[in-house]
Amino acid sequence: KVLRSETMQYEVNELAFNEDGSALFVASANGVDVMGKYPSLERTFNLNIGKSYTLCASPDGKTVAAGTYGSTVSLFETEELGCRLTLMRYDQYVKALSFSHDSRYLALFEVNGNAVEVTDAATGACVNTVVTPYARKIGAVAWSPVAHIRAYSCGEHVFLNTSPFTPVVLPQTTHVAAPPMFDGRGMPPTTMMPPMGSAVHMPGVMLPQQAASRVAMPYRR
């Protein structure tokens, strides 16, 4: 039984509900549309991050991660729809995203990559990278619903990875990326901001104070 249908202006790439099912996130060439007021499917907000290929909602319902064709991954708070982190360290667009069962980690891989990256969802730091033993690109990735066990595929092979995470040691003087102002192709600029005080900043991670311009915009037809 079809409860409701809605025709979008762009091809839809991926869908994700929030925790209580009151909103549906839609990734497309229009960025990420937020369909609220369930089950009316009325488009209420747009997360203006450029052409979006993939997205994933965290099990705790607090975060939605979205990957763009501009090779970035943005993490949004589902309640206020504010962008709290943007990862900009990828050479190609991210094909798939998956949160761990406790929402602490985000697993992802690039479209033609042969490695699965595990990122701390709170800080944006890369805590683990697993390279496949085959010179073939990753096809899919998923977390166990009860433990920090990752499954990923490479061609006809499927792997389970339970190795302990190895945190990345960051230098004391690194730069944080400036807020991207996306053009029509969804491409961010390459300029960098100077270090902020004595705080440690992760390369390729845009922190909340730099993400002020990346907010949800009311949807206008």
Image (cartoon, rainbow, N blue to C red):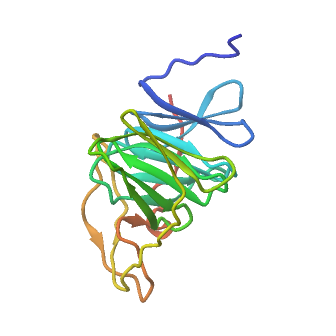
Residue at x 46%, y 53% (from the top left corner): 74
Residue at x 58%, y 53% (from the top left corner): 149
Q: Is residue 53 something one can see in this rendering?
A: yes
Residue 214, above or below 5: below
Residue at x 34%, y 84% (from the top left corner): 173
In-image side of 92 versus 64 (left or right): left
Q: Position of residue 146 (x, y in %)?
A: 69, 51
Q: Position of residue 193 (x, y in %)?
A: 31, 73
Q: Residue furthest top?
A: 1
Q: Position of residue 135 (x, y in %)?
A: 26, 45
Q: Residue furthest bottom?
A: 198
Q: Residue 134 occupies which quadrant of the picture?
A: top left
Q: How many marks on residues?
A: 0
Q: Position of residue 177 (x, y in %)?
A: 34, 67
In-image side of 46 versus 185 (left or right): right
Q: Residue furthest right?
A: 20
Out of 19 and 161, give the one closest to the viewer.
161
Residue 185, above or below 126: above
Residue 163, above or below 23: below
Residue at x 72%, y 36% (from the top left corner): 22
Out of 19 and 50, give the one closest to the viewer.
19
Q: Is residue 213 something one can see in this rendering?
A: no
> For the N terminus, which image quadrant?
top right
